[in-house]
């Protein structure tokens, strides 16, 4: 069987997902949700979605009666994920939600609880968790090739453009660079080191308070510590280019990804050899794998469930607390 997906929020990233899904073997776009009638019409004819499977935010709850749709993929601005995911769950549909899953731990927890109560799955759009070069490093680390892991470095950022976009509006974005791009360093630290952090320290710098208003972080450096003794050092920024790099160091070797989380091709090497998996659109692989998770109960090498997403939010809140207080924050992640 094929996972039949309704895309909600027909913006830039939804476009990329819809195009990549044309190459999926197990997933298909069968529904659309948008507040703009013209987009529903245009996307409907482009992706062959019949009128009966097109919804506005007003009619969306009727999706519960639609047998052509198994899952809703929420691709709206961050602060809307919470309500959108809960509505989809209450309509009895599985939910795929873009990162960051929400703008607070409390909202994230409510989403996990609502999906559990509705008996539907909640998966977060962590496309890198399915990327072949990334998974090769994870598998080699698990096989002991790098020895005991000591250190990870994650640098994630770009110079953001238009000062009026929702990404720079705390109400819609939840924060600044950390919620949008720094989350890749947080999530990457967790899958590269292979452990959950037990403490975090962080420092914020802001060079442009006009563009990056109160509550919208421009640049944050943060450090994470692990029970094994490993440490990580990361950079999240909206004001520097050429930052998309992961470096993992162990007693017996190292692995590097550069670029590490962009749309690809992802490139990298270990102390022994280059990583050469051919490039396939990340969203194509992600949606085929998510279909297998939802339809076949497949257990992925790296989980992408709601609880995994919630850990990132707990770390994000701790990083903001560390910036505000200057004090090290202890983390208790299950
Ligand atoms: P975008 O601005 O291009 O698209 C957002 C869409 O949501 C637009 O079509 C907009 O009309 C719609 N929308 C619905 N209600 C809205 C409201 N009240 N205010 C503003 N817009 C509203 O943004 P995007 O880049 O597509 O990002 C959407 C989500 O996808 C974000 O959560 C983002 O973090 C995530 N994203 C993930 C990746 C990834 O690689 N996984 C990449 C880009 C974006």
Image: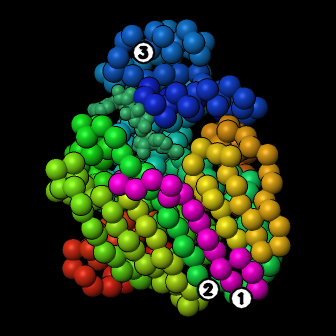
Q: How far apart are marks 1 and 2 (CA)?
A: 7 Å
Q: Crowding near pointer 2: few (<14 within 10 Å), some, many (20+)?
A: some
In the rendered structure, does residue 201 fall within the stretch colored magenta? no
Q: What stretch is highlighted in magenta?
A: 238-254
- Regarding ligand 1, which quadrant of the image does it lie in? top left
Residue 99 at x, y percent in the picture: 46, 49
Residue found at x 78% / y 59%: 275
Q: How crowded is mark 1: few (under 14 residues within 10 Å), some or many (20 or more)?
A: few
Q: Is mark 3 within 8 Å of ligand 1?
A: yes
Any mark on residue 184, and which?
Answer: none
Tell me the SS state at disc 1. Answer: loop
Q: Which x, y percent locates residue 43? A: 51, 15
Side (left or right) of 5 relative to 9: right
The residue where tag 3 is placed is 39
C-alpha span from label 3 to label 2: 49 Å
Q: Which residue is drawn at 57% across and 33% down?
A: 17
Residue 57 in the image, given as x and y percentages of width and height: 34, 24
Q: Which numbered disc, 1 or 3, marks the residue that appears first in the sequence? A: 3
The answer to whether residue 300 is above or below residue 154 is: above
Quadrant (top left/top right/bottom left/bottom right) for the N terminus: top right
* Vertical arrangement, residue 200 with respect to residue 241, above or below: below
Q: Mark 2 points at which residue?
A: 150
Q: Residue furthest right?
A: 272
On the image, numbered disc 1 is attached to which residue?
Answer: 251
First along the sequence among labels 3 and 2: 3
Residue 94 sits in which quadrant? top right
- Relative horizontal placement of residue 210, taking residue 205 as reference (left or right): left
């Amino acid at each position: 069987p094929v996972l039949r997906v309704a895309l909600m929020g027909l913006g830039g990233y939804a476009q990329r997902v819809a195009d990549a899904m044309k190459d999926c073997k197990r997933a298909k776009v069968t529904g659309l949700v948008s507040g703009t009638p013209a987009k529903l019409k245009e996307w409907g004819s482009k992706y062959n979605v019949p009128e009966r499977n097109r919804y506005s935010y007003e009619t969306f709850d009727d999706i519960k009666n639609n047998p052509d749709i198994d899952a809703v993929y929420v691709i709206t601005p961050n602060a809307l994920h919470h309500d959108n995911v809960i509505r989809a769950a209450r309509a009895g549909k599985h939910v795929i939600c873009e990162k960051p899953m929400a703008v607070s731990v409390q909202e994230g927890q409510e989403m996990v609880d609502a999906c559990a109560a509705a008996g539907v799955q909640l998966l977060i759009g962590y496309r890198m968790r399915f990327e072949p070069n990334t998974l090769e490093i994870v598998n080699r680390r698990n096989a002991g090739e790098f020895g005991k892991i000591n250190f990870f470095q994650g640098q994630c950022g770009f110079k953001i453009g238009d000062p009026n976009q929702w990404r720079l509006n705390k109400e819609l974005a939840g924060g600044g660079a950390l919620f949008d791009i720094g989350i890749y360093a947080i999530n990457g630290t967790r899958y590269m080191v292979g452990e959950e952090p037990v403490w975090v320290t962080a420092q914020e710098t802001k060079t442009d308070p006009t563009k990056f208003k109160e509550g919208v972080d421009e640049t944050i450096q943060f450090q994470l510590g692990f029970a094994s003794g490993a440490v990580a050092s990361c950079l999240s920024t909206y004001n520097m280019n050429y930052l998309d790099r992961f470096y993992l160091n162990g007693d017996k070797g190292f692995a590097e990804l550069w670029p590490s989380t962009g749309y690809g091709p992802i490139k990298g090497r270990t102390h022994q050899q280059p990583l050469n998996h051919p490039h396939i659109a990340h969203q194509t692989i992600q949606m085929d794998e998510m279909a297998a998770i939802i339809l076949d109960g497949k257990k992925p090498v790296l989980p992408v469930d709601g609880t995994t997403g919630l850990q990132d939010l707990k770390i994000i809140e701790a990083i903001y607390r560390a910036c505000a207080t200057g004090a090290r924050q202890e983390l208790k992640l299950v």
